[in-house]
Amino acid sequence: MTLRRDSGTDVLVVRGARLEGGDAADFVVEDGIIADVGTGLTRAGATVVDADGLLALPGLVDLHTHLREPGYEASETILSGSRAAASGGYTTVFAMPNTSPVADTAGVVEQELALGEAAGYVTVQPIGAVTVGQKGERLAELGAMADSRARVRVFSDDGFCVWDPLIMRRALEYVKAFDGVIAQHAQDPRLTEGAQLNEGAVSAELGLTGWPAVAEESIIARDVLLAEHVGSRLHVCHLSTAGSVDIIRWAKKRGVNVTAEVTPHHLRLTDELARGYDARYKVNPPLRREEDVLAVREGLADGTIDIVATDHAPHPTEAKACEWQAAANGMVGLESALRVVQQSMVDTGLIVWADVARVMSRTPARIGRLEGHGTPLTAGQPASFTLYDPRPVRAFTTDDLHGLSVNSPYLGRELPGEVRWTVHRGVPTVVDGALLDAPGVRS
């Protein structure tokens, strides 16, 4: 099938898709919007998509993606990361600021925004650093980034904890003025010096320095109290322990304006995988115990945890093909996230597909204050969606990866599902399971 990617005016008629897992319906995409929803719909000259048996989900939104550009283009670029995102059903990604230079000024976030627009596969929304150079010493240009063309509303030093409580308080106070949010990497640096793996039986047996759960939980506890005191928004990145779930649950009952995310790998994998010293399983925060996996699944199912975010963290082969202690932290996750959520949460009966639309699309867009994204599949809304087939089960391989790095923990593992179509603002980027080339975008 030949489709133009340089125009949003092609008309699509999608027939028989189950909208968010509910009833089957047809819908028409025209001029970048959903023009009509119903049954028996047709348009003269339209491209007709037979979606019988497929789910139609609003375009996925990732609040936590590392695109590495500028500065670390050997790991990923905004173009390659955008391609990876589209292949996984995403139409929007929020780009973390740990680049070189760090995204701590209006100039850098506007550069990232422009590169995302040039790539064209997804909307790339920059996240600004909380502190200058992510060093935790003084606040970055939060207001300038918020007022820039990028309209930044999410700020994070991810990879580093905003450890100083006074800096954290001032950041929460500052972003309150424009309804921003501080996304905290909850890790007490003193409690995790030299940490390599979750502190527990496995780390003790392997002789690896432990990363204790309390190092995450203590920062979350402090920050929810600071957020309550200031009356500002707090978001907790990659929550990973049972204790952290309990703290967020308590804070929400108390009325604190806090949201939290969990990664697909913390929903699925445990520290037992480290026994082979395979550095693909080295990540920060580390893979935890089975008890923690079950607790974060329950937290996502009952709404304590608000969203799933990938923490997509690409690294070149040499950064992972080495001894565990020297290896980089991180896993790629954009291409596998939806399939892992199906396996961990839907196929286990913990949530339904309408919940997937909420935790992987609508709520992350709302937290990021990004209007026109994560919108329902109704007439008049922007046409950003994915058509997903939950029925196939097959091994995840390097053929599924479309970024520059291959540090996936799922290689060789059987995962359900397949993204059949991704449409971004009316323009198809994945058709019949194949990622499209993008004429006219930078190479």
Image: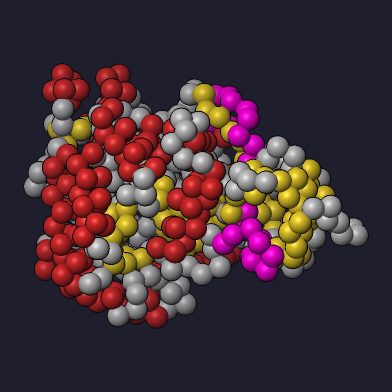
- Image coords of residue 389 (percent x, y): 64, 37
> Which image quarter: residue 195?
top left
Q: Against 338, is 274 above or below?
A: above
- Pinpoint residue 190: horizontal percent, then vertical percent: 8, 47
Residue sitting nearer the eye, 310 or 292: 292
| Nearest the eye: 320 or 420 | 420
Q: In the displayed image of the protein, which residue is found farthest to the left?
A: 190
Question: Quarter holding the N terminus?
Answer: top right
Residue 277 appears in view? no
- Please give the name of the residue rendered at 32% of the width and 32% of the height, measured from the top-left corner: 294
Q: Is residue 391 above or below residue 175?
A: above
* Image quadrant where residue 8 sits: bottom right
Q: Is residue 139 left or right of residue 378?
A: left
Q: Is residue 150 visible?
A: yes
Q: Position of residue 244 (x, y in %)?
A: 22, 45
Quadrant including the C terminus: bottom right
81 falls in the magenta region: no
Residue 376 covered by magenta stretch = yes
Q: Whole-percent x and y of residue 89?
A: 58, 47
Give 118 or 11, whichever is nearer the viewer. Answer: 11
Query: Which residue is drawn at the image coordinates 71% and 46% (left, top)?
Result: 24
Colouring scheme applied when the structure was drawn? secondary structure
Tally of numbered discs = 0
Q: Nearer the viewer, residue 92 or 403?
A: 92
Seen in the picture, residue 322 relative to 375 is either above or below; the reply is: above
**In this rendering, position of residue 375 left or right of residue 440:** left
Residue at 19% x, 42% y: name it. 243
User: What are the residue bounds of the magenta stretch?
Assistant: 375-399
Q: Is residue 76 left or right of residue 58?
A: left
